[in-house]
Image: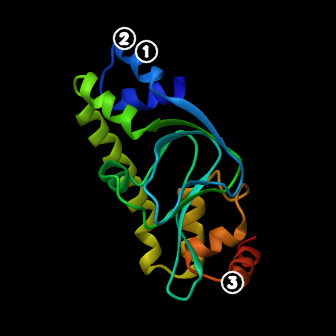
Amino acid sequence: MEALINYILQFGDLNKQQIEFLLSKVQILEFKKDDYLSEAGKVPRYVAFVLEGVFRFCYYNNKGEEVTNYFVDEHNFVVDNEKFESQIAAAEYVQAVTDCKVLAFTKKDWDELSGTIVGWEMMKANMIKKCLTLAMERRSPLVSEDATTRYLSFIEGFPNLINRIPLSHVASYLGITQQSLSRIRRNIR
């Protein structure tokens, strides 16, 4: 719980009562590897703060191939915010890559925070902005770089993930085959 509060306090001040109220609205959920926090075609049920583990955003392209779009690890929020806030069906899956533990808010509880905590809307907007900025910073170099540079950028952007997630997900994220990733890794050593 402390990690969540420390994260939120980067975006504004909360008094003791507000913190207690916020914590009264959160629930601890656990996901086994390969479980879904959110599924394409369904309305996201939670906004979640990752305490332990790694999630990935993924979808299936028009060839039926699974594509990993993004990873979220500890001490970050994992949510398709636009779909969650609007309560419309998600376009992507949010899947646990490892066993995960999260602090989750339902839509009702998330909205109660806005209606009760003065300044929460601005704090929430800044948290969302940080999540989006981080995602863009990690994704944008992948567009123009060669495969080796993309892999090195991945290691730099996600330094704690390379030994925790399947290489098939890393290859998908980088837009290369697993064989190409193995060759790149071999040549770098």
Q: Amino acid at mark 2?
A: Gln
Q: Secondary structure at mark 3?
A: helix
Which residue sits furthest bottom? 63
Report the quarter where the N terminus lies: top right
Query: Residue 45 at x, y = what percent?
Result: 46, 47
Q: Earlier in the sequence, mark 2 or mark 3?
A: 2
Report the quarter where the C terminus lies: bottom right
Q: Amino acid at mark 1?
A: Glu
> In this image, 55 relative to 26: left or right?
right
Out of 84 and 79, give the one closest to the viewer: 84
Out of 107 and 177, give the one closest to the viewer: 107
Query: Residue 159 at x, y = what percent?
Result: 61, 54
Out of 54 and 46, give the one closest to the viewer: 46
Quadrant of the rendered structure where residue 63 is? bottom right
Q: Disc number at residue 90?
A: none
Q: Secondary structure at mark 1?
A: helix
Label 3 to label 1: alpha-carbon separation:
50 Å
Q: Nearer the viewer, mark 3 or mark 1?
A: 1
**From the viewer's perspective, is residue 18 above or below residue 125?**
above
Residue of label 3: 180
**From the viewer's perspective, is residue 21 above or below residue 137?**
above
Residue of label 1: 20
Marks 2,1: beta carbons within 8 A: yes
Q: Disc number at residue 17?
A: 2
